[in-house]
Image (cartoon, rainbow, N blue to C red):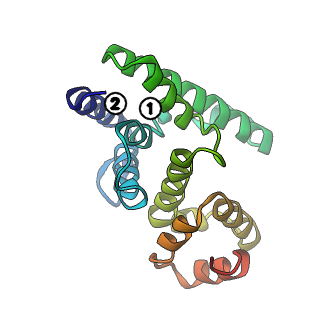
Amino acid sequence: MNQHQYDRIMAAIDDAHACDPRQDKASDTPYELAYARRMSEWLERVAPDADAELRVAARAQHFRRWESPREDYPMTRPGYHAWRTDLQKRQASLVAELLSEEGVTADEIGRISALILKQNIKTNPEMQALEDTIALAFLDHYVEAFAEEHDDDKLGRILARTWAKMSAHGHQLAGTLTFSPRLSRIMAEALPAAD
């Protein structure tokens, strides 16, 4: 992918995210546009040498996500997993269509799609960098509001699962963040000792 293609693709992703009717209160911008920008900011810290494909995958993680609301699926654990699986497939397909329109090669589209689909997390260093980026964006911008909706036990389990998906580098970056006293206590109890 050349620089012109990359710039057009990132602009198209942002244009799509700007259509999200929900607003991010902290930034006063469309919710998914704020999320996409935060993903790119965290990727710069996680993998400053990331190539264009990884940067596109990070920016497009929630591509047009609001069009497939969680409420359309049963409010159960299997319903949640079905929603997430369908969502990833839909997002990968929509992004692949956008990339194809921009003349991106089939190999590049395949790499970006695999990242959006979260394939080979434990064997693909790019996927691990993306997983760290997702976790860090969550911990930095969303976990406090998320914590208000869950009791300590459930929150501890969710945080432990998030932590287990991260690399040692991701853990180090997470150590630079500041949390509320409640969240700090839950994390200290739920997470393993520092790497």
The quadrant of the picture occupied by the N terminus is: top left
Mark 1 Cα within 10 Å, few/some/many (few <14, many 20+)?
many
Q: Is residue 182 shown to the viewer in this render?
A: yes
Residue at 34% across / 30% down in the picture? Answer: 16
Q: CA distance from mark 2 to mark 1?
A: 7 Å
Q: Given contact means CB atoms under 8 Å apart, are the residues at marks 2 and 1 in contact?
A: yes
Which of the 4 image quarters holds residue 72?
top right
Residue at 66% across / 66% down in the picture? Answer: 159
Q: Is residue 84 left or right of residue 135?
A: right
The quadrant of the picture occupied by the C terminus is: bottom right
Q: Is residue 83 left or right of residue 114?
A: right
Which is nearer the eye, 88 or 102? 102
Q: Is residue 67 shown to the viewer in this render?
A: no
Q: Earlier in the sequence, mark 2 or mark 1?
A: 2
Q: Which mark is residue 94?
A: none
Callout 1 amino acid: Arg
Relative height, residue 109 to residue 193 (above, below): above
Q: Which residue is mark 2?
A: 16
Q: Is residue 94 left or right of residue 41?
A: right
Which of the 4 image quarters holds residue 98?
top left
Relative height, residue 160 to residue 94 (above, below): below
Relative height, residue 96 to residue 19 (above, below): above
Q: Which mark is residue 64?
A: 1
Residue at 64% across / 46% down in the picture? Answer: 123
Mark 2 Cα within 10 Å, few/some/many (few <14, many 20+)?
some
Image spot of residue 107 (x, y percent): 47, 22
| SS for callout 1 | loop
